[in-house]
């Protein structure tokens, strides 16, 4: 059994389409098909059910996929560990976030400590983030809501109240608080379903008898305050996203303690490099300092 066979099998298993897998791997479809056939011959069983051009993992394939992913995961971790030992001042950090408002300040602080280290950040939905976590493809996730799993470590780093943001000219702008029931006829701007804060807010609003009406749904939380300021709609925004320079009024919610928890999440088996350990320290320190500033 060859390493290349495992890599090709995992790609085909994830895409369940030979043509798309061949394009992803930059190989010919015939070469890919022959490689999968050799693997099945080595194992003595078919790994896929063929339905036209589509493939479906069968019971054998599903069980083998989990083992193959673990094998390649361990090899990748070994490669990262050796790279870290050989060149500790360089390297790369893979990050995924569902809670992005604090990320610019965190990355700025981390860049001061590790000016030569490269990092790659993805803004994802919770389900997308979980898929990367389970495959061990990210060092850390900054997630709201927190996620749990057998292979996942979840450390709560912040409890962030959610406020109502309205433009300065709005009828509620002069108030310090509002009940959710008063908002049932308002138009909202927000992120798409699948993001933690959106799902939390929708569920709470549903519990009091209304569904928020969204005039805008996106995947960039940082854009929402600009849309509120432009009077496109009002928004549920975390306290950490407040900016004193904006022409926005923030109101507390009277009848519900809407709080999002932010967690630092990682895979138990993923190798944690020195740089990744330092990133975790920066994240924890950032939220601790912010909590102190809020309470003083």
Image (spheres, rainbow, N blue to C red):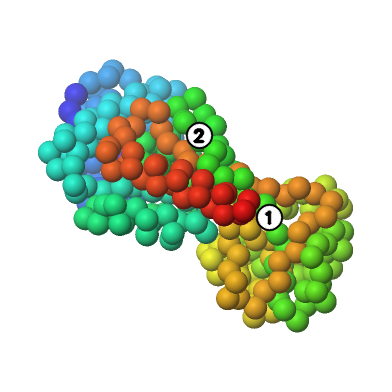
Q: Residue furthest left?
A: 86
Q: Is residue 38 left or right of residue 238?
A: left
Asked where in the image residue 278 lies, by quadrant, the reply is: top left
Specify which label sits upstream in the sequence, 2 or 1.
Answer: 2
Provide the secondary structure element on which disc 1 rests: strand
294 versus 176 height, above or below? above
| Residue 108 drawn at (x, y percent) | 37, 59
Badge 1: residue crowd in 10 Å (few <14, some 14–19, many ≥20) = many
Residue receiving disc 1:
162
Residue receiving disc 2:
154
Q: Residue at x 28, y 18 (%)?
A: 44
| Residue 240 drawn at (x, y percent) | 58, 58
Q: Quadrant of the N terminus?
A: top left
Q: Is residue 236 left or right of residue 191?
A: right
Provide the secondary structure element on which disc 2 rests: strand
Q: Residue at x 79, y 65 (%)?
A: 176
Q: Nearer the viewer, residue 181 or 126?
A: 181
């Amino acid at each position: 059994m060859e390493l290349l066979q495992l890599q090709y099998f995992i790609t085909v298993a994830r895409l369940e389409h030979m043509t798309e897998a061949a394009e992803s791997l930059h190989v010919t479809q015939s070469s890919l098909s022959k490689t999968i056939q050799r693997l099945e011959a080595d194992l003595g069983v078919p790994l896929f059910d063929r339905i036209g051009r589509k493939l479906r993992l069968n019971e054998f394939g599903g069980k083998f996929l989990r083992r193959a992913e673990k094998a390649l995961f361990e090899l990748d971790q070994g490669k990262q560990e050796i790279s870290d030992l050989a060149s500790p001042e360089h390297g790369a950090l893979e990050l995924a976030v569902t809670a992005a408002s604090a990320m610019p300040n965190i990355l700025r602080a981390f860049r001061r400590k590790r000016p030569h280290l490269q990092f790659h950040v993805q803004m994802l939905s919770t389900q997308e983030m979980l898929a990367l976590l389970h495959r061990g493809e990210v060092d850390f996730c900054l997630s709201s809501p927190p996620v749990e799993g057998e292979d996942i470590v979840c450390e709560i780093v912040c409890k962030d109240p959610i406020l109502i943001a309205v433009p300065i000219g709005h009828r509620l702008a002069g108030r310090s608080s509002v009940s959710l029931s008063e908002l049932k006829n308002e138009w909202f701007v927000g992120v798409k379903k699948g993001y933690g804060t959106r799902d939390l807010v929708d569920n709470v609003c549903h519990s009091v008898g209304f569904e928020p009406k969204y005039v805008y749904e996106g995947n960039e939380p940082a854009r929402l305050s600009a849309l509120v300021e432009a009077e496109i709609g009002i928004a549920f925004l975390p306290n950490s996203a407040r900016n004193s320079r904006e022409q926005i009024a923030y109101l507390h919610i009277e009848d519900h303690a809407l709080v999002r928890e932010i967690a630092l999440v990682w895979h138990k088996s993923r190798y944690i490099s020195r740089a990744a350990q330092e990133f975790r320290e920066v994240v924890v320190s950032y939220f601790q300092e912010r909590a102190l500033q809020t309470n003083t």
